[in-house]
Amino acid sequence: MTTIRRRTPGRVLSYVALAGYVVLLGFPLVWLLSTSFKTPRELASVSPSLLPDSFSLTNFRHAIEQQHLLRAGANSVLVAGCTTVLVLLVSIPASYALARYRSRLRGAAIGWILVSQVFPVILIVVPLFLILKQFGLIDSLVGLILVDLVWSLPFTLWMLQGYVAKIPTELEEAAATDGAGRLRTLVSVVFPLLLTGITATAMFAFVQSWNEFFFALVLIQDPKLNTLPLALARFVGQEGQVQLGPLAAGSLLSMIPSLAFFALMQRRLTSGLLAGAVKG
Amino acid sequence: MSLPATLDPPVPAPERTPSRTRRRDRGGTVLVLPALIPVAVLSVWPLLQGVYLAFTNTRAGQQGSSAFVGLRNFADLGSYGLFWQSFRIGLVWAVSVTVLQFLLALGLALLLNMRLRGAGFARVLALIPWAMPPVIIAIMWQLMYDPRSGPVNGILSALGVLDHNVNWLGDFSTALPAVVFVGVWVGMPATTVVLLAGLQSVDEEMLEAGAVDGAGTWRRFWHLTLPSIRPVVVAITTLDFIWSFNSFDLVYVLTAGGPGGKTMLPVLFAYNEAFKYGNFSLAAAMGVVIVVVIVALMLVYLRAQRRAT
């Protein structure tokens, strides 16, 4: 009994602290959500309330009808989609090689992967700008896709090679013993087991490229080629506080893919990798 | 593909003759090549060129070729007071973000590790800032800090802390703390997840033994839990520091370095130097200085940590 009595105040305090964290983490999101539904008149009021008086979709319509946000959305889909496809094409074979072959390249590749995680892009961005300029890839979505590809690769390679390493080599050897050729083994044994990893990698690459801001800021000057983060950031600069409502609505809309992907990924990643192998 | 296949005793690996190994290596190289080429062209090469640029006099829109000028850019930087001022701001930013983030994240990780009711909800909530793009986070906090209608002023006035509305991001004295707070909010999730993983790997029997020996909660935490997660703590604080020092998006959208340069992080400074004023080589020199300082600080920190253990 004494231990329970001694522990109760501590436990209550813990709940209070946890509630504090929930408010700290959640409140800004709730505010963004509520701002996006408020009418312009309510937004202009001096004492704003947490819940909107009436749920208005004006801001969303305003955000979508603003041509540049819609176009920016289309650009973002294009850039993130192409980046994802390229990332997969390049990193599936490379990560297989990194996980399975002990070549000298492996050490160099892993060193580069680690370095790039902590590397200040500011040192790279000027020469990158000059190199892309030589190829006429400034103010071009192709240039942006290539840059996004390169900056997604370290992490996607790292991620995927981890998934490959978890596939027992015995499975491949068994397939080889059963007479399957090299390619056949890869396609019908390794690939299906790697699907979870490939999905996760694809999502990561998509979200990374969807959210990417710095390189887009440097490389894209033509407003017609704005990606979503760029359009939203420039929206802030232009309109300032007058347009809080549409800005909040636009931000929410542009967050949907990343939130959806993360929600999906959480479930995907918890289902065990080898569950698929056992079930066949 | 069947279960027995994985349960069979491991087949002894076939002996590898030199020729076989070499063939395998070549196969590996071919597979890695498509990834290697873009990485080499768009990150290794620019990196080397970036270092070289720092020793030239390259400017934007330059017609002729640039010349090698040795250490002149670095000498110029030495007397460039504004840059060093921004460096000091960057250090204050990175250190305060890292320390506050660590303390807050440790608190949250300890709470999540206690298996309280609602911890699952808090854990999912803690992941959300992670999934949000920095640009959106910056916009969201602009709404929060809005001097006229933002809830930060609203709540603090209601609590009686403030008697007038503060322009958090626009005022010289509050801009940097306000930006640091957002930096902490953004990075807390990743730090919490890492620390939580560390806490979950702490040997519970050891803690129980400590309790039996009469150590209270605080002493168990200080003498048993903390030393066991020390490597995790060192790793994540190192990364947090580097990430904060290198971060650009958040502060660029929140304040663009203003007001009056009070939140001008070195990375923002170098960006302006390059793409606003066109001083490419000076910006590259700043990049080199930033890298050198970060590496030096990390070496000192890691060595101090190693000596302490």
Image (spheres, coloured by chain):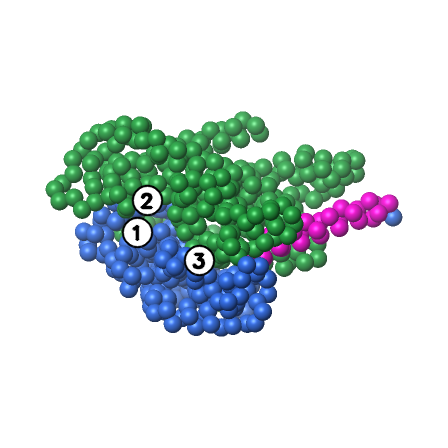
Chain colours: A blue, B green
Q: Which residues are magenta?
A: A2-29
Question: Where is residue A280 shown, x and y percent of the image?
Answer: 51, 69
Residue drawn at 50 percent across, 37 percent down: B95
Is residue B137 in view?
no
| Co-location on one chain, circles 3 and 2 | no
CA gap, disc 3 and disc 1: 25 Å
Q: Which mark is residue A218?
A: 1
Residue occupying image coordinates x 50% and y 62%: A44
- Chain letter of the residue beneath label 2 in the structure image: B
Q: Which disc is residue B271 wearing?
A: 2
Does the stretch in magenta take in A16? yes
Kindly identify the amino acid type of the residue bearing the numbered disc 1.
Val
Q: Helix or strand or loop: what does disc 3 sit on?
A: helix
Q: Amino acid at mark 2?
A: Tyr
> Viewed as shown, does residue A218 lie left or right of A260?
left
Residue visible at 38% across and 50% down in the picture: A154
Magenta region, main secondary structure:
helix
Q: Which class describes the residues within 10 Å of circle 2: few (<14), some (14-19), or many (20+)?
A: many
CA–CA distance between discs 3 and 2?
A: 25 Å
User: What secondary structure is found at the residue carrying circle 2?
Assistant: helix
Dot 1 surroundings within 10 Å: few (below 14), some, or many (20 or more)? some
Kind of residue indicated by mark 3: Gln
Residue at far left of view: B64
Q: Which residue is mark 3?
A: A241
Say which of marks 3 and 2 sits in front: 3
- Nearest to the observer: residue B20 or residue B181: B181
